[in-house]
Image: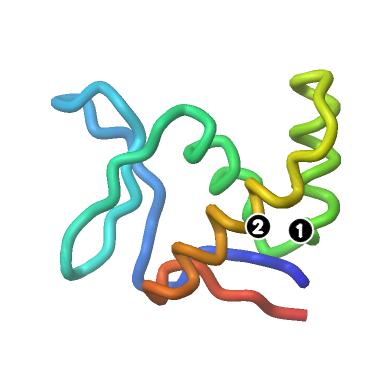
Amino acid sequence: MIPHLHAKARLQRDEVRGREVLLYPEGLVGLNPTGAEILALCDGARSLADIVATLERRYGASGLERDVTAFLDGLAAKGLVVYGP
């Protein structure tokens, strides 16, 4: 599975709030740094496994798949993230 942002959504820095946000026509989702980093990796080229592996290497952690999947699935349920081939 290769997650990517839906065409109607975009990741952007909100200077007023001082954080990354996911903008879409009906509103926005405020992101913590980890959420923003996950979405930045959702470029349509990396698989979910690649994203998890990248994050585990960066943070020297393991077992992140469940949390990353839950985060992306939550956004997919809102139509903001799409899974493709």
| Residue designated by label 2 | 69
Residue 34 vs residue 9, the one in the foreground: 34
**Which tag is nearer the camera, tag 1 or tag 2?**
2
- Relative to 60, is 3 above or below? below
Query: Can you say which quadrant of the picture contains the N terminus?
Result: bottom right
> How many residues crowd mark 2 within 10 Å: few (<14), some (14–19), many (20+)?
some
Query: x%, y% of residue 55?
Result: 75, 34
- Relative to 84, is 27 above or below? above
N-term mark: 1 or 2:
1
> How many residues crowd mark 1 within 10 Å: few (<14), some (14–19), many (20+)?
many
* Residue 18 as seen in the image, left or right of residue 12: left
Q: Which residue ends up furthest to the bottom in the rendered image?
A: 85
Q: How many marks?
A: 2
Q: Which amino acid does label 2 sit on?
A: Thr
Q: Do the residues labelled 1 and 2 touch (CB within 8 Å)?
A: yes
Instruction: Name the residue located 41 percent from the left edge and 31 percent from the top edge.
Output: 32
Q: What residue type is labelled 1?
A: Leu
Query: Can you say which quadrant of the picture contains the C terminus?
Result: bottom right
| Distance in Å between CA atoms under marks 1 and 2 | 8 Å
Instruction: Name the residue located 46 percent from the left edge and 72 percent from the top edge.
Output: 6
